[in-house]
Every structure is written in C-alpha cells, then in structure tokens.
Image (tube, rainbow, N blue to C red):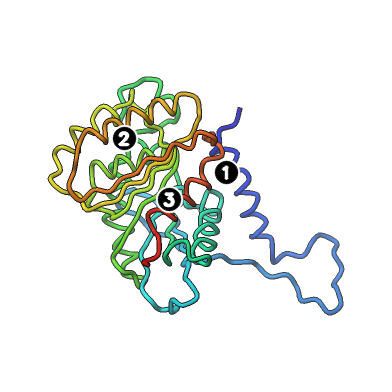
Amino acid sequence: MASRRQVLGLAAAAFGAAVARAGEPAAGAAATPGASPAAPLAIGETFTLESKVMGETRRINVYSARAWDVKPDAPLPVLFMLDGGVAEDFVHTAGLLQISVASLAMRSFMLVGIENTQRRRDMTPPTDDPEDKKIAPAVGEAATFRRFIREELMPLVKERYKTTGETALIGESLAGLFVLETFLQAPEMFDTFIAIDPTIWWNKRHIVKTAADTLRSRKRLDKTLFIATSGEKGQPELAGQLEGALSAVKVEGLQWKMVQMLDESHMTIGHPAAMRAFRTVFKPAV
C-alpha cells in the first residue's frame, strides 16, 4: 500500500505537470475566436542554491501571504517549510497560508519551501535500529541538512527578502521528526516549531527517551512548540509518551502545546493540523 507521502507526491506531481503545461495548447486544438492563448500559471518565486554543505543543488520556493492592509514591501516573518517542492507540499501549504491570512486567522507570513533531493537522508538523525536503515540507501544526515539551512539558506533569504527576523519551521512525518530534533538540539535557529504527526518511533523512540534530559539542560527557552498527532495505530500511545516527557520539565519561557487529532490518520492529518497550528501560534495581534 502506498504511503501518504507517495500518494500526495503523485498528486502534487500531476498538478505541477499541469501547471507546467498550462501554456501549451492542447493537441489538435483549434484557436478560439476572442480567447487569448493559454499562459503558465505561476505561484510565488523559485530559485536554486548551490550548496557547499550538501554538495548539491537545492531548489527553494517562496510565497508571500499578505493581508489586505499589509504593504507589498513590508517585511514579513518567515515560515521555513520542509517537503517544500511544487510536487510535494508547497502549493498546499501556500494555499492554507493565503486563506488563513485573508480571513485574518493568522498574521501575514512568507513561506520558504525547501524541495527534497534525498528526503529520508536529510530528515532523519542517526539510528542504531537495523529496521530504520532499510527505508533508504542513506539515512541519518539531519545534522548536515540543518547546517545547510542555518549556514546557507537562512542568510540568503535574509539577504534577498525583507524579513522581520522572526522565523518558524514546519514539517510532517519524518519532517516532523526533524522539527522536533531541531527544537531539542538547535532551538536558537527558530522562534516557532510546528511538528505534524512526527515519526517519534525512529531509533527505538530515542527522541522520547531523551527529550526530558535535553530540556533540563536549557535554563530558558523563549520558544513556541506545536505538535499535532494522528489516531494512526500506535501513534496515540507514542504521543502520550512524548507529552509526558515534555511535561516532566518546566522550562522558563517555553510555550508548547500538543494536540491529538484522533479522528485523523497519518494520511489526512496534514492540512487540518497545519491550519490549526497557524491559527494557534500565528494569531493576529488583538
């Protein structure tokens, strides 16, 4: 059975191909009097970055969601998004931002989507579990990917665009695991962390087992953490364990919330969880 990521990837790829073909006339189609030729439909901006850290070219997609009263040149906070290719989750999430901002449910934001090259390599920390290592030829390079974001991508975004300095990170499934690990290992990178149905079973639940001790080493964290988990088999129990670990430590300044969306599966939680997160952590100032 195909995974959620495979299903959504195929659907998004079909959409991306349709957008790319938007300027091409249908085969055998005759010109229609009074109608202009079809033209490509563009969403935001896209560029590539030659990464010395990763040793490869990475594609970055950008979309700015502005409320009606926010000037076109006004600086925006930035939401860095994993799985951010057009054939991945970028278009879906840009739409959620657009409708959330337009309806005044969240503040204006810039979305920066990071397209994957080797997803399972980049999103996962090292593992001692032989079963984990079977999912891809290479795993466990999350630290290198984090260096790319910190040392190359974030400075470039700051240089290219007008930003406020406020930053956030969002990811789902393995990308949700990356968000959690980044929060625990490098909390200084972002102000807000959104992890949707993270794969907390990775490396025999290592992140659950170590979260409390890691947090105890932090005297203060002026950060926001939002976690949403599904009712997928086994996930509510793991989520409860993670919630217990986080609750065991009181860190000054830290605001965190875990929402168990038991009516959602791993396949369906993405959109409703992201919408809930946006309305919770990015609420407009009253």
Picture quarter with the N terminus: top right
The circle drawn on residue 125 is: 2
| Residue 102 pos. (x, y %) | 52, 67
Mark 1 / mark 3, whichever is N-terminal: 1
Look at 26% across and 31% down and name the residue there: 245
Question: Rounded to the nearest whole Å, what is the CA distance between mark 1 and mark 3?
Answer: 22 Å
Mark 3 / mark 2, whichever is N-terminal: 2
Q: Quadrant of residue 215?
A: top left
Residue type pointed to by label 1: Gly
Q: Nearer the viewer, residue 245 or 285?
A: 285
Look at the picture and state if 202 lies above or below 95.
above
Q: Nearer the viewer, residue 217 or 57?
A: 217
Please state which of the two labelled residues, at mark 3 or mark 2, is closer to the viewer: 3
Judging by the rendered image, the residue that carries numbered circle 1 is 9
Residue type pointed to by label 2: Pro
Please state which of the two labelled residues, at mark 1 or mark 3, is closer to the viewer: 3
Is 50 left, or right, of 8 in this rendering?
left
Is 252 left, or right, of 93 in this rendering?
left
Question: Rounded to the nearest whole Å, what is the CA distance between mark 3 and mark 2?
Answer: 25 Å
Question: Rounded to the nearest whole Å, what is the CA distance between mark 1 and mark 2?
Answer: 23 Å
Mark 1 touching mark 2, by CB under 8 A? no
Residue type pointed to by label 3: Ala
Look at 60% across and 49% down and name the residue there: 12
| Residue 248 pos. (x, y %) | 22, 33
Label 1: state its secondary structure: helix
Label 3: state its secondary structure: helix
| Residue 56 pos. (x, y %) | 39, 50
The circle drawn on residue 277 is: 3
